[in-house]
Every structure is written in C-alpha cells, then in structure tokens.
Amino acid sequence: MARVPAALSTMLNRTPNRIRPARHRPLPRLELTARPRPWLRALGLTAVVLVGAWLGLLIVGNVRAPVGPMDTTMALRPSVSGGTKINISPLGALSLDSHIAPVRLDVNVDQLDPERSQALVDHPERLSGLQDEVARDVEHGTLDLAVRSCVAVVSGATALGLAVYRRPRRALTAGGLALALLAASGASAYATWNPKSVLEPRFSGLLSSAPSVVGNARSIVTEFDVYQKELARLVTNVTKLYDVTSTLPAYRPDPSTIRVLHVSDIHLNPASWKIIGSLVKQYQVNVIVDSGDTMDHGAAAENGFLDPVRDLGVPYVWVRGNHDSRTTQRYLERMKNVRVLDDGRARTVAGLRFAGIGDPQFTPDRSVVPGSEASEELAGARLASALRDQQAAGTPVDVAVAHEPSAARETDGQVPLVLCGHLHHEGTEMLPYGTRLRMEGSTGGSGLRAVEHKYPAPIEASILYFDRDSRRLQAWDAIRLGGLGLTTAEVSRHLADENQPGATRSPSPSAPGSPGTATASP
C-alpha cells in the first residue's frame, strides 16, 4: 500500500476545520406577558393611597385632649358628606353639618375628670370663664389633631406602598399623594365651614336629655353669636349634664315662651297618647295642635280611642282630616279641653290665636275622589278669606291649621304660620308671600300602615316655640322616634330665619296680607 504524501495528509487534516458549520446566534425570546396599562397602575396607586391613609388615621390618628373638665378623643374619619359628630356616651350623639369634605371630625367625650369637675362644683364662679377655657382647649386639640393626621396618612400610605411595590420611590409617592389628599380635604372643609351649624344640631339617643343639651330657644338666639362661644356653651351644658345629681341644673322653661306641641295623623295608634303625654310634661307644653287624621275610619265605634285627650292636662286644638268623620268631630266638641277649628272660625288658646278648617273630603278607604284637589284648594281659599276678615277686624290670626298641604298653601300672605299634615313626613316651606308652612309627619307612625313598607314608619312630632309678645315662631324641635319595634330617638333644633345670628326684624308692623320679612347680614 502506497504511503500518502505528508503534504496531502496535512491538507486532509485541516479540511474539517474549514467546513465546520457556522454557529447560529440565539433568537430573541418573545415577551408573552403584556406590560400593565397606565390606568391600572394609577388605579392601584390610588387604592394604596386611600387604604394606607385610612389605616394610618385609624391606628395613630387619634388625639386625646382635655376640653374643660372633660377628657375627649378627637379623630378624623373618612366620610361621604363630612360634618362633625360628638359622641356623648351614654346619652347619644350630636351631629353638626359643620363642613363638606371627605373627612368627618369625631369627638368622643370619654369621661369627666373628677378633680376638674369637683373644682367647678366647689367654685361656681369659674363657670364664667369656662367658655374661653373650652375654646382654647378645642383650638389646641384641633391643631394637634391636624399635625397627627398628617403624620398618620403619610406613614400609613408610605408603609403600605413599600409593602406592595417594594420600591422606596413608589412608596414615597404614595405618602406624598396621601398628604396632598388630606390637604385638599382640609381646604374643602375650610371653604365650606359653617359656624352656625351648632345652632341646628341633630341629637340622637336619650330623648329626655335633648332639651338640657340643646337649651331653650331664647338662650340660643341671645347667647350664641360666634362659633367658639357656641361650641363652648354646648360643651358647658354637656358638662353640667354629666355632673353629680345634686348639682345638675334643672331645665327651666323661659316664662316668655309659648310651647306648642304639633301632632298629626295618629291613625288610631294607642301608643301615641303615651308619647304625647310624655312630651307635654317634658317640654312643659302650653297647647297641643292636632292637624287631623286622628282616626282611621271615623266610625262611632272608634270614638272611645279619643278619651285619653281629656287627661292630657292642656288645651287640645283639632281640625278634621280626611279619615275623621263629622261623628268624630262632634264627639271631640263635647270635651272641655278640646277646641275644634272649622270653617275659619278663630279661637284664642294659650295666648295664641288659631283658625282652621276641616278637610272637605271623607275618604276612610283611601279612595281618590275626582276633583279632590280643587275641593282642597277651595277649602283653603275659604280659610284665607276668614283670615282676611280677622285681619280687617283687628284680631289677626297667629296660626292657621288645615289637614291637606294643598289647602294650607292657599293661606299664603294671610298668616305668619300655617300647620298641616296628611303626607306622613315632616317638612318646612317658605311660601312666596311670606307664610311659613310647617308640615308634620305621622305621630302614630302611620298606624296600621306602619308595616306596609320595608322599614317601619317613624313617629314624628314637633315642639314649636313662640314669643309671647310678638306671637311669632322663634324655633322648633323636630322629634323623630323609631317606628314599630325600634328604640331610636332623634331631636333636631331649627331656628326661624329672623332669629339666625345677624338677622334683623322688620322695622315696622307688616300690612294686612303681607307678613313681615327678615333680612340676614352676610
């Protein structure tokens, strides 16, 4: 076998290296997961900011502050409508429409400090300076709460952002947004701040405590002029309410105020008489006005239901409703303390002059009669004519009473105040020519109709405060009790426009048919 030349052997050995296939670069891997959309990231950041800020306020946002002789806890809480809530355990709570913002100020009255309370009892002269002390304490507590709340929302949002994103920059962004949100809420509260809200509080809890906390109409008109004094007076009254029994001041009605209890639409509810009797004693009522529908069918067999009226101890002014029959009216006319109003006839009761008209319809089956609206308006026109006659005779009527609101509206311009019912919910309306229409809810909780809807109908009544000299409405307390099976109670105080701080009365008596108006300074 011939030997291969050395040069050829070397060439063959090098050939494989030259024909070795080239290396291919790896293909880029496809991104199968899409990047998050910007709005999703923004939504997530918003959720982190809101939840973190709320947790911060909940955990470290409370401030304990002494206010006069009381120890309180102040806190900001997320809210849709804002406002201020003062929790006075165990009496209930005061709600004030103080501002509109996504945060609510909660003030919890924890307890009375024994030493500070005893010092007030031993030295009553210190009460004169308690208002200024309370105002200073509230101001300092609010400033501390603002600082604590800023720290709380920033800490909460930053901590939650760090836990979710694990990036310091993103966490600091969340904290900054939380602080900006709180600052915007504070600006909104400042812009919508309503210092007069303390004049119209809503008191929920024990009904018997409400008058002592709120005070009487005259004291509210004359003693509350600026917000700090208003708040201080309110807290001072609460302090007295918490005091020992021997020093608890009794509720003394203003001797120049006439108190009228307005009830309506009792609808055969026997529990109403107990409630009415309690209100008469509690508020030292001078006269009761019933704007009709005391009965349900108006049958003679129902007349015995009216017998407790004799035992109420005060005059009872009554007009016929569409569920009350002439038989019902004649039965009440025989009671000594009842004053039935009909056909515009006027009666003077407890220092006030009343006139009213019975409902022209009798529909115990709740039927709708053709032309019923026209008949109501005609009855209202008859009442308005009688009011004009009284005015011309020099014996003007102070309060008109009808059952239907459509009839009551016809008296506009002829009387300062007209009372009505029928619709089973309370409300107040200033009519175009200056007459105030006050509509009462159902004092019987709609009677047997209380269970027709998802929730039981509430029991409603009002205490109206009249000045004895001018015989004009000064204020009213709207009382709302939970309906069948419920145990809630709420009292809200309302002032007539002419009694708001800064308002002035008309300089001269109004002409017939044109009730006086009131103007308020900005």
Image: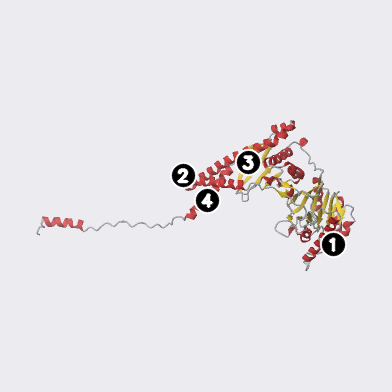
Contact, mark 2 vs mark 3 (Cβ under 8 Å): no
Give the Cα separation between the discs numbered 4 and 1: 63 Å
Q: Which residue is mark 2?
A: 168
Where residue 246 appears, x then y in whole percent? Answer: 78, 35
- Crowding at label 4, few (<14), some or many (≥20) Cα neighbours within 10 Å? some
Marker disc for residue 78? none
Q: Which residue is mark 1?
A: 325
Towards the viewer: 333 or 34: 333
Mark closer to the chain start, 1 or 2: 2
Where residue 29 appears, x then y in whole percent? Answer: 36, 56
Q: Amino acid at mark 3?
A: Met
Q: Which residue is mark 3?
A: 74
Where residue 331 appears, x then y in whole percent? Answer: 88, 58
Give the Cα separation between the discs numbered 1 and 2: 78 Å
Towards the viewer: 40 or 184: 184
Q: What residue is shown at x 63% (from left), y 41% (from top)?
A: 74
Residue that sits furthest to the bottom in the current view: 370
The secondary structure type at the circle numbered 2 is: helix
Does 492 sit left or right of 332 as displayed?
left
Contact, mark 4 vs mark 1 (Cβ under 8 Å): no
Q: Which residue is mark 4?
A: 46
Towards the viewer: 172 or 410: 410
Q: Is residue 499 above or below residue 264?
A: above
Q: Amino acid at mark 1?
A: Ser
The secondary structure type at the circle numbered 3 is: strand
Give the Cα separation between the discs numbered 1 and 3: 56 Å
User: Can residue 179 be spotted in the picture?
Assistant: yes
Towards the viewer: 193 or 164: 193
Where residue 375 appears, x then y in whole percent? Answer: 80, 65
